[in-house]
Amino acid sequence: MDTPFRSPLALMLRYGLLSILAFMVVCPLAWLALASLRPQAEIFQPVSEFGWHTFIPSRLTLDNYRALWNGDFPLAVKNSVFVAFMTVVFGIVVNALAGFAFAAFDFRGKNLLFLLVIISFMMPFEAIVLPLYVMIRAFGWANSYQALIVPEIANGMVIFLFRQFFASIPRDFYEAARVDGASWLYIFTRIAMPLSWPTIATSGLMLFLAQWDSFFWPVVAASAPDYAVVQVAIARNINFEQNDWGGLFASTNIAILLGTIPFLLIQRFYVRTLISGGIK
Amino acid sequence: MISSRWTPYLFLAPALAGLLIFRLIPIVVAAGGSLTGVSLMGDMRFVGLENFEYLMTDPEFWSSLNITLLFNVIINPLQLAVAFGLALLVFRPLRGVWLYRTLLVLPMAVSTGISAVLFGLFLDGNLGPLNGFLEWIGIGAQPFHRSADQALYTLIGIATWKGAGYWMLFLLAGLYSIPSTVHEAAAIDGASAWQRFRHVTLPLMRKPMAFVLVADTAINFLFFAPVYILTSGGPSGSTSVLMFQAYRAAFTFSDIGRSLAVSTILLAIILVIVVLEFRLLRSPEERA
């Protein structure tokens, strides 16, 4: 369709630019992944003599990872996985129920309540971290799993996504099931939810990323070592003078993989949902 | 069986309770708490606008407000421009473009705190590769987040590395929603590629671009993790954004009232932004 974009020069320019940008994104990640496999003694070597060995270790070893096993890092991974899993499971159920209500019913106050949902997803969570901390402390929830999980369950963006999806199913479909004597709960669990798995995948990733990306809230609400999630545990390690750089490299690399692997598996649905105008 | 009249409310109850308790009531708590002070005995008392009066005469608060504004004035247009450039590059069909798109959005999955740690290592003077590279090509090593002159810009760079791909997706959605017939019609009329970009694509992208700019601003006014992890507001206060001031008031000075006063000011800014965002999102037909 576009002659200027089809010329070999333009094509090369586009590949060139994309490759440079992709390199800028990947380079720090790849460097860290390789550096985490270096022997401890070699970690300070690269800066003085820049060259291929800045990136490629002379010898690959899992020592840095093995050493992590005995510290408190495995607990932080366990905390993160548990908190993320609970947020995703409860978040999907709770927000799908609400999205279904907005799509399948007409009721008093619907527009006002939907406005509340929209406003809540435009206001970033970080805006209310400090007052929420005052509340959580009053509940006696400071330094607990529920402080990390419960506030992240209801999510306006996810309610919105589910509403969009359930609204795309004709209401006659629900009504027909009603006529056959099905309860609304049955319709939701057995008819609506099984149809919505791409939305479930996207929402699950969204809830996971919201939890995974949060930093201010876990630092404020649950910084005790027993409840520290991965990002808090690692941030604490970079703050004072290090003598275990290998451990910091390895734990940071694990933290990157914990986020990027689920993301790579599901991002196709996620990107498609965003691009198809699910959110705009 | 439950009567159908109550069913929608039962379905909504858990989510709405969550939004009410964890999103809306905190706004009220911030506003109310900003009017209190903690005495030496630890009990709260009403102090009226004292916390705000204190902030208004506190040079540290004004300098922090300035830094937050400077940060936002630079980072939001920058991220928008980068995200738009990326969206244009991956929009048209190209062999292997999905791979580039995947790589460009990958930083979305790197937790903000972790990306700060990653760059703390990558830019480090002793063990990071970037300074080695800069010396090798003759520019010389840079202090980055360890100097008052470069720290804020280093944080802007890190946040852009992390955020540009995410905003690219919203702009990509905007590009896909432009009907291809519009471009074809312009091409038939003899418009060059540049003219079509300038007079067709750009005007039609105004709304998605405005949305990204506003939504990004709301997030960047609350910028915190990289400051906490890499600079602690320094060197010499050069990265002490408002969110960090609010954190320090609460956890370094144990002054919850003052911390909530800073939070209230930030919330007021955010609510203005949300209203703007809402007007942008409301019924596109109104503007078309």
Image (cartoon, rainbow, N blue to C red):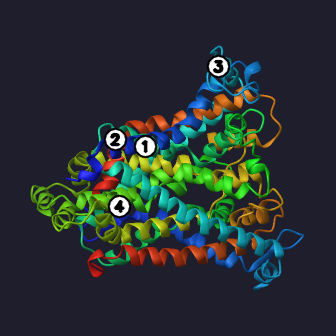
The mark closer to the camera, 1 or 2, is 1
Is there one chain holding both mark 4 and mark 1? yes
> In the rendered image, which residue does mark 1 sit on?
A18
> In the rendered image, which residue does mark 4 sit on?
A279
Image location (x, y in percent) of residue A201? 35, 44
| Residue B16 seen in this snapshot | yes
Q: Are marks 1 and 2 in contact (CB under 8 Å)?
A: yes
Residue type, numbered disc 4: Ile
Q: Earlier in the sequence, mark 3 or mark 1?
A: 1
The mark closer to the camera, 3 or 4, is 3
Image location (x, y in percent) of residue A223? 71, 47
- Mark on residue A57? 3
> Which of the 4 image quarters holds residue B5?
bottom left
Q: Are marks 4 and 2 in contact (CB under 8 Å)?
A: no
Identity of the residue drawn at 37% across and 37% down? B99
Q: Mark 2 — on which chain does it sit?
A: B
> In the rendered image, which residue does mark 2 sit on?
B97
Identity of the residue drawn at 71% across and 64% down? B241
Is there one chain holding both mark 3 and mark 1? yes
Image location (x, y in percent) of residue B50? 80, 83
Secondary structure at badge 3 equals loop
